[in-house]
Image: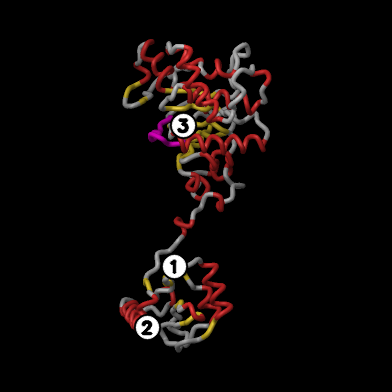
Amino acid sequence: MRDVSFTVDRGEFFVIMGLPGSGMSTLIRCILRLTESTAGKILVNDDDVCEYSGQQLADLRRYTTGIVFQHFGLFPHRNVIDNVAYGLKIRGANKEERHQRAREVIAKVGLEGRENQLPGALSAAEQQQVGIARALAKDPDILLMDEPFSELDPLIRRQMQDKLLALQAEFQKTILFVTHDLDEAVKLGNRIAIMKDGEIIQIGTPEEIITEPGDPYVREFVQDASPARVITAGSIMEQPRILLYEWQGPKVALHILRTTSSSAHQGSQRRNASMYPRIYSILPPMTLKKGLQLVKSHFTMASTHSASGTWINVGKSNIYAVSLSSPRESSTSLSSVISSIAVS
C-alpha cells in the first residue's frame, strides 16, 4: 500500500472495494497491526496504534475492535456458544457471564437453538453468522469485516446483507467492510473507498461514486451500475419558486404570477421561457400520481388563459395547477400544464 489516507466517522458503515490484489485485506490487517505498516499513523480515538505497546495492542484487539474473517475462523472442536463466547473468555469473564452474553447475540443473529452444535453441522451462512455473533459478543466500538459474504450463494448473501443492516441499525457500530462486489458496496455502505494497486482512487457516497466517477478506472468499475439504485428524489428535486395555497383563490394567485413574471422580465432583456418560473407547488399536498389522475379524469376549465399562465380548477377538489407559458406563446395547452405540475 502507498499514500492511503482516510477517516471513518463513529457509527459509519465504510466499505473498501476493489479488484483482488488491490490491498484491501492488507489495509484491514494493518489497522490491527496483524500486518505492520512501514510508515504513517493509524489513529483510533486520536491514539496512534503504531505506537502501542504489546499490552495496549492486546487491549485494542480484545475491547475496541472485533473482526469477521472471510473463511469464518471458527474452532471446529468448540460448539456455537463457546465459539461466540471465546473473546469474552480471553478477557477473563466467567462462564456464566460469557454464556449469557453469547446467548443474547446468538438470538440476535438468528441462531437461537443451535448453541450446542459444532460448526461442521452448520451451513456456510450459519457459520458466518457465528462469526458475526462472536465479534458482536465483545460489544466492540469497531467491526472489521474482511469479505465476510464472498463464499455464500447469491440468495443467502442477500439475506445476510439484510441481516447485517438490521444489526447495524440496532447496534450502530463503526464498520469497515471489504468487498469485491459493487452491488454489495452500494447496498451496505454509507461511503465507499475504491482501491487499485494499493492506493485509494476515490472516496464518496454510493451516489457520488456512480454518478461522478473520479477517473477512467472508477468509471469502468461502475459502468454497469444503475444510477436509479442510488439517486434519491432529494438529489434531483427542484425547489418550487412560488407556493400557491388553495385558500388564496384564483385572483391572488394570478396577481402573484403576474408580479413574478413582470419581475423576471425586467431583470433580463432575453425573451426565453427558461427565464420565467415554471414549477409551482400545489397545496394541499397530495401525491403526483393522484394529482395527475385528477387532472386527466376531472379536468374542467374554471378560469381563463393569460399571458402569464393558466389557472385550472380540478373537479370538486379545488386543486389548482399553474404553468407559465413562454413569452411567445399566447396560451398554454392542457398537455403542457399536466407535464409541468409539481406537487408538494
Q: Is residue 226 above or below residue 299?
A: above
- What amino acid does circle 1 point to? Pro
Colour scheme employed for the rendering of this structure: secondary structure
Q: Is residue 84 above or below residue 202?
A: above
Residue 260 placed where, x, y %? 34, 78
Residue occupied by mark 2? 254
Front position in the image: 67 or 219: 67
Residue occupied by mark 3? 175
Q: Which of the two marks, 1 or 3, is nearer to us in this view? A: 1
Residue occupied by mark 1? 285
Q: Secondary structure at mark 3?
A: strand
**Residue sitting at x 52%, y 39%:** 188
Q: Is residue 128 magenta?
A: no
Residue 225 placed where, x, y %? 59, 47
Contact (CB < 8 A) between labels 1 and 3?
no
- What amino acid does circle 2 point to? Leu
Front position in the image: 202 or 61: 61
**Residue sitting at x 66%, y 23%:** 122
Magenta stretch, residue numbers: 4-13
Residue 132 placed where, x, y %? 54, 26
Front position in the image: 187 or 287: 287
Q: Secondary structure at mark 1?
A: loop
Q: Secondary structure at mark 2?
A: helix
Contact (CB < 8 A) between labels 1 and 2?
no
Q: Earlier in the sequence, mark 1 or mark 3?
A: 3
- What amino acid does circle 3 point to? Ile
Q: Earlier in the sequence, mark 3 or mark 2?
A: 3
Front position in the image: 237 or 73: 73
